[in-house]
Image (spheres, helix red, strand yellow):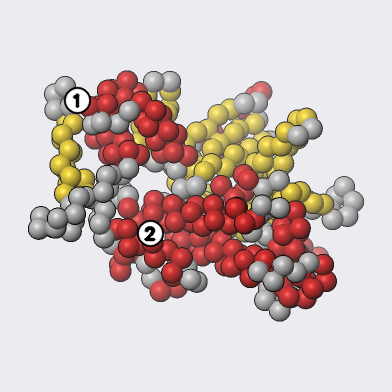
Amino acid sequence: MEKTEKIMDREIAWRIFAHEFNMSNLYVSEGDERAPNYIITPTGVKCNRLFIVGVVTEVENIGKDNNLWRARIADPTGVFTVYASQYQPDAAIFLSDLHVPAYVALVGKARKYEPEDGTVYLSVRPEEINASDEKQRDRWVLETAERTLERINIIEDALKPGLSGNELQEFLSKKVTNIALLNGVILAIKHYKNLDKTIPELKKMLIHAIDTITSVSDSGIINQPQKPEKTKEHDIPVKKTEFKTHESSFENEPIVEEISVGENNEIVEEIQNPSGPDTKEEPPELEPKELLAAIIDKLDTGKGTSFLTVIETAGKAGINAQSVELSLKELMEEGRCYEPKIGVLRKV
């Protein structure tokens, strides 16, 4: 009976993107020192536990006697930092044996660390971590986008009347049945003063996350999106129009038809306009990040590729050094490539 009650009292494991998790700066505790702590996100998640599926791009032993491991788990919006110590032995062993990059699914506790006033680091302490795959990661991205969009809609509905205090609580009580989310939304609206700017940023994040999993194939090569087959009805976000701009943009997006690498690592690109040869419109330029992803994919034949070779090849493709640096950072944060050692890049 006691065990059953403990299971029933367990906190919800929320689906949250790394970008929203890392931008959160409201922390609450209810009760004494042993009471659970919560991180309140801008969309009102009252987060004590979270569920992540992503790509582990880095694992490092940072403790003595191999008793503290740090890992970075990337989703399409950013990176979660994970710590596993002797108190999470199964997770520590799992990470110590892991060969990166690797897809994983993790349930863990949200943690904050304040080394000094004004400086806060958020991280995740794993309760359970297992191997996963690309399909499960893609499904997690879609479901997390759907849940995030639902919370965004609640926040926007609550902001329109300009309510506060008891009126706000009464208004939200009619819309939100989850008590934890209801309390979290009220706290978020009260704390985050610039939600009018944050919400559009989070919407762009959702579009970017879905764009990432629908425009990149297993090998990292850019493909024409397979919208009808890729998304089932229950996976579609609540408001499909939220992603209409993204979907319509696929129709005119150029496709890297073929990229070949010569003896001197020279890459020749043939870009085809999907709208056909008869159209008079100029094809839009392909993002430097996607060109760079294709370059790394071609150059990396299994053992990685030299950073300098990527720079040189990108330069020949017309990508300047600043764009290369920014694009590499984004690709690493999205878990699409990583740096196993200094000067070497590998595709995921």
202 or 82: nearer the viewer: 202
Q: Is residue 301 visible?
A: no
Tell me which residue sits at (25%, 31%) in the image: 318
Which part of the image, by quadrant, shows the C terminus? top left
Residue 189: image location, x then y, percent: 72, 59
- Which residue is denoted by mark 2 in the rendering? 246
Image position of 330 with respect to 192: above or below: above
Residue 343: image location, x then y, percent: 39, 20
For the residues bearing labels 2 and 1, Cβ distance under 8 angstroms: no
Circle 1 crowding by C-alpha within 10 Å: few under 14, some 14–19, many from 20: some
**Horizontal relation, residue 299 to residue 68: left or right:** left
Q: Is residue 183 visible?
A: yes
Q: Which one is in front in this view, the residue at disc 2 or the one at disc 1?
A: 2
**Horizontal relation, residue 150 to residue 247: left or right:** right
Residue 70 lies in quadrant: top right
Q: Amino acid at mark 2?
A: His
Helix, strand or loop for disc 1: loop
Residue 199: image location, x then y, percent: 58, 57
- Which residue is denoted by mark 1 in the rendering? 265
Between the residue at mark 2 and the residue at mark 1, the CA separation in whole angstroms equals 34 Å
Residue 165 lies in quadrant: bottom right
Tell me which residue sits at (18%, 31%) in the image: 267
Tell me which residue sits at (63%, 37%) in the image: 83
Lower sequence index among marks 2 and 1: 2
**Horizontal relation, residue 164 to residue 303: left or right:** right
